[in-house]
Amino acid sequence: MSQASPLAELLAAAARPMVDARAMPPSVYTSTDFLDLELSEIFGKEWVCVGHASGLPNVGDYLTFDLAGQPIVVIRDREQGIRAFSNVCLHRMSTLVEGTGNKRVLVCPYHAWTYGLDGQLRGAPFMAETTGFCKENYKLPAIRCEEWKGWIYVTLDNDRPSLASGLGELDAMIAPYEVENYQECFRETHVWDTNWKVLAENFMESYHLPVCHADTVGGHSKLEEMDCPPGLKAFNYHWITKEASLPMGNAHPDNTRLTGHWRKTTALITLYPSHLITLTPGYFWYLSLHPKGPGQVAITFGGGLSPEFMADPKAGEFVATLKTLLDEVNLEDRGCTEKVYRGLSADKAVPGHLSYLERPIYDFMQYIAERTAGFERSFAQAAE
């Protein structure tokens, strides 16, 4: 399929008003050319979440992430800062480390070139007779890295404005939670057989909850009470105020920070392009997505508790309960989103109208159209 066809179809869909909006055309999910455009214009330039800072508590703790073809290692250095580097040896270009763990130094598994936690080459066996070699000249290229509310973000674009500079409105919206004090309790990686946008859209709308999640959280979802306001430049969001399905879904009795409706309000936030957050008074969970191809998505999945629930004697029980529920929810979402990708790959697939409860999907479509095809977005003022 040509690149022009998905772009033209996407622009036509993005230009429709919300009252007559339709889902994105199948071509933007299935086209390899369109995915290449997303990798260069979105994932190669935007800030992308790779994990949570509380998941790297000790010197030498690290995680790895592949961003638009660039392997990255994020590590807690000896000064307790968090740094990101190219995860590629400067000798014969092997990747250095995999997954997560703790390292005193980074040792290449190919020829044992060894780098400090500052990225500087510390040792290179059998190089003394190479007269042009000077280990002081070798340092792993730094990758821009920032923290926001406890999450770690990286970007490959050296000229990108700081992450925080675009999130002031969101900071104000979620300030009562003080989410920067929440603690990550688990982080995993998965690969599902669906397009990354299908999974992103699934997360950012609650219209599917009563059906897809009938056996888990669906019964606690009152669609008529959900608020889905227009999104803003860097994110979209919606709110759910409810009695939680988990004890830590509402505020802990020791939580004196949250009052009134905030004690029962859940925020569902999508930070573009692919950081998806459910934030409640007692816990959070998140996904960070990266395409592995049109029909596969790499997923970073993590979650944890608010300080009051972490301090509770039953904290371990709360974590286990949360993880069990989320594993069940993810299993349901995997089934639904993989069915969507199989369906939209069919020759006769036709996108239908969106519900008002899918407002975040409409905003996401316009974001994708802006980044890939130059669509001009407009924004409503943030809700109080």
Image (cartoon, grey):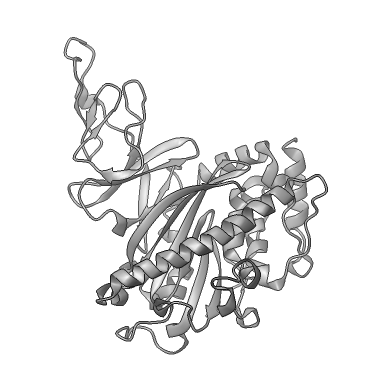
Nearest the camera: 106 or 213? 213
Q: Is residue 290 left or right of residue 61?
A: right
Nearest the camera: 69 or 110? 110
Q: Is residue 62 left or right of residue 291?
A: left
Look at 33% across and 68% down and name the residue there: 182
Q: From the viewer's perspective, is residue 247 above or below residue 376?
A: below
Q: Quadrant of residue 100?
A: top left
Asked whether residue 305 appears in the rendered view, the answer is no
Look at 63% across and 55% down and name the residue there: 337
Q: Is residue 35 left or right of residue 120?
A: right
Asked whether residue 239 appears in the rendered view, the answer is yes
- Spot the residue most to the right: 348
Nearest the camera: 252 or 382? 252
Quadrant (top left, top right, bottom left, bottom right) of the N terminus = top right
Q: From the viewer's perspective, is residue 119 above or below residue 226?
A: above
- Spot the residue most to the front: 215
Residue 353 place in picture, x, y as percent: 78, 64
Look at 35% across and 73% down and name the residue there: 178
Residue 374 place in picture, x, y as percent: 67, 48
Q: Is residue 45 left or right of residue 125?
A: right
Q: From the viewer's perspective, is residue 324 above or below residue 72?
A: below
Q: Quadrant of residue 359?
A: bottom right
Residue 73 place in picture, x, y as percent: 34, 41
